[in-house]
Amino acid sequence: MTAYLRALRLERWPRSAAIILGSATFFFLHQDFLSSFRPLETAFLLALSFLLTWAISTANYVVNEIVDAPYDIHHPAKRHRPLVQGKIKKVPFILLGIGLTAAGLGLAVVFFSRSFVLSLLALLGAGFIYNVKPVRTKDIPFLDAISESANNPIRFLIGWYAFAPRHLFPPLSLLLAWWSFGNFLMTAKRLSEFRLLRDKAADYRLSHKRYSRNLLLFGMIASATVFLTTFLVFVLSLRLYRNLIIFPLLLLYLFLFFRKTLEEREVMEEPESLLRNPLIALLTLVLAGLFALSVFL
């Protein structure tokens, strides 16, 4: 049972917690809706939407664990995954994924709007598009990072529609900013693989056959530029001028990610590992705190 739990990658729950940003932004931009929800109701809906997002994300990891097993064997860390090591069986693992999907979508239909359910389905669909042939965007240069980072705006939408009526759509500039920041991180992960796996990189990830160090650096720079530009558009279009105070901190944040990616001596399995850097972790907390203050001030 321990091996099955490890294969579900439950430790990646912080990714699902990203829905909180969507919910917080909704109430920040539409404060008149705050009175529509009682505190306990808000807490319940937020907790449930997190659990449902976590369930669907975990179901996607089931898909990834199965279809990536032939490639993971070439990765220094991922070759120790339970399915690659033969510690779990496919059929019960698939049934576990189906159960998580059915429970997640079923509860979503009962408690949330159609827009929320569609956003949850989009998260599930994104996992299949990224992992499963004949599409499998994971094998296509740049489209692999773009499609993987699409989970960022999708999770934002899940958090948004946990409370928002279906006719209210979040600012497109903010969705693009969140998407491009995710793409920045996913490209950083690929650069780490390319640097440290060298000739074996393409055995693990087919897209590395057409990547180069300069192309991946360009991808990171382009993603950072789009992120900063769309964030500025969001702030200026809604006249949220007080949020400009975090812009220099965002520049520093991106610089630290750049430097850490280029200095890493181990392959970055997931971008969250960069948060082990004390300065990056501290700056993350500062940025989150400043955003929270901007909501209530």
Image: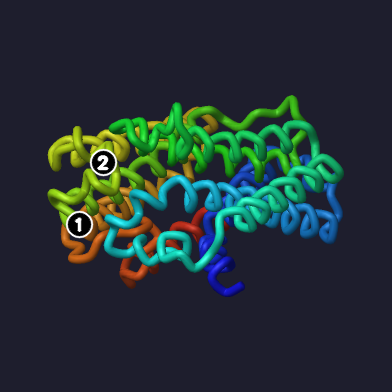
Tell me what residue is drawn at x 53 percent, y 64 percent.
Answer: 88
- Seen from the viewer's position, the closer of residues 31 and 252 is 252
x and y, in percent, of residue 61 in the image: 53, 52
Can you name the residue that lies furthest to the top here?
167
**Tag 1 residue:** 259
Circle 2 residues within 10 Å: few <14, some 14–19, many ≥20: many
x and y, in percent, of residue 79 in the image: 34, 62
x and y, in percent, of residue 117 in the image: 73, 37
> 251 left or right of 162?
left
* Tag 2 near tag 1, CB within 8 Å: no
SS type, badge 2: helix
In the rendered view of the protein, which quadrant contains the N terminus?
A: bottom right
Which label was assigned to residue 270? none
Tell me what residue is drawn at x 41 percent, y 60 percent.
Answer: 84
What is the CA distance from the residue labelled 2 to the residue labelled 1?
Answer: 12 Å
**Tag 2 residue:** 220
Circle 1 residues within 10 Å: few <14, some 14–19, many ≥20: few
Say if 45 sits above or below 286 in the image.
above
Examine the image and state in which quarter residue 148 appears.
top left
Say if 179 sits above or below 75 in the image.
above
SS type, badge 1: helix
Tell me what residue is drawn at x 29 percent, y 44 percent.
Answer: 205
